[in-house]
Image: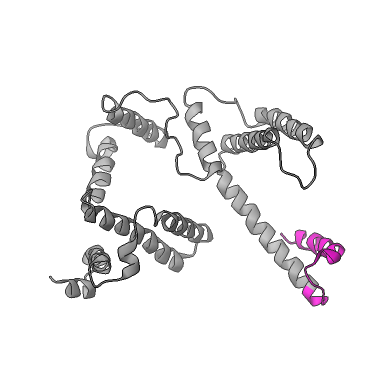
Amino acid sequence: MNDSEQIRCPDDHLQIERLRAIMHRLRSPGGCPWDAEQTHQSLMINLIEETYEAVDTIRRGDMPHMKEELGDVLLQVVFHSEIAEGNGDFNFDDVAREVSDKLVRRHPHVYADSSVADTEGVLNQWEAIKAQEKGGVEEEKPYLHRVGDGLPAFLKAAKLQKKAAKVGFDWPSASSILAKVQEELDEVKDEMASHTEGGEASEALKDEMGDLFFVVVNMARKLKLNPEELVDRTNQKFLQRFTHVEQSLKSQKLGLVAENLDAMELAWLDAKKST
């Protein structure tokens, strides 16, 4: 089957091969100059952005756009694999084979004779198998080595805390963290006392703000809440309320300027009643 036939291929089970053929053609001589110039490094932000856009459709339950955004994520995987193949490193089949082998290996309760009773047992078994896979292959690393690398800061904080909790380094409950939240908040207040409004924050103030965020993430984790989702939930609420403020001022023929702050605050209070 030549390139043009693969690109037109109507068979659903061959669509991944069609995608690979298209990507290969785009990076080949006579293809697309932009695609041919891309590297793993130049595409990193694309992979991050496409992933977040896919996550957004999942949050909103937007099935048509979820299909599109998951396709964009898949494109990034195929794109990186095509670059790697051109460099002689690996290809898409290697990527698929490795993850398939990993899934079979880490699900012995499905593909072998292991027995687990529930989800917790599955997760514990998964971690045990991961540890076995790394044993003897690499030199011993610190317990938190590479945990959460590449994740947004809040998610990385939660991953670090969760891993530390596995060895007992944890708060007994979410409510027990409240006092620590207050302690960190007081330390922020202390640093704020010597902070000049509008000036650059001191290193100590940056540290205390970071500590406050970290302990709040810890409390969210103990409540089995995803900190990234919580902040996004608040982002959406703020967006909805501020849009109401904007529309309210527009109806009064007022602009979004500091001079109309009183009107903004009244509109904000009105928006809070419905959200």
Residue 128 at x, y = what percent? 34, 28
Looking at the image, residue 114 sits to the left or right of residue 126; the answer is left
Relative depth, front residue between 184 and 168:
184
Region in magenta: 250-275
The residue lying at 61 percent from left, 49 percent from top is 231
Identify the residue at horizontal 74%, vertical 72% (top origin): 247
User: Does residue 266 sit above or below 131 in this rendering?
Assistant: below
Magenta highlight on residue 127: no
Based on the picture, tell me whether residue 274 belongs to the magenta stretch. yes
Q: Nearer the viewer, residue 6 or 149?
A: 149
Left/right placement of residue 261 relative to residue 13 reads right
Residue 237's x, y, as percent?
A: 67, 58
In the image, taking residue 234 as reference, residue 102 lies left or right, namely left
Residue at 37 percent of width and 63 percent of height: 71
- Name the quadrant of the N terminus: bottom left
Residue 10 seen in the current view: no
Give residue 201's position: percent from left, percent from top: 71, 40
Residue shown at the point (25%, 46%) measured from the top left: 100
Relative image position of residue 186 (x, y in whole percent): 76, 31
What colouring style does the render use?
Answer: one colour
Q: Quadrant of the C terminus?
A: bottom right
Name the one closer to the observer, 253 or 128.
Answer: 253
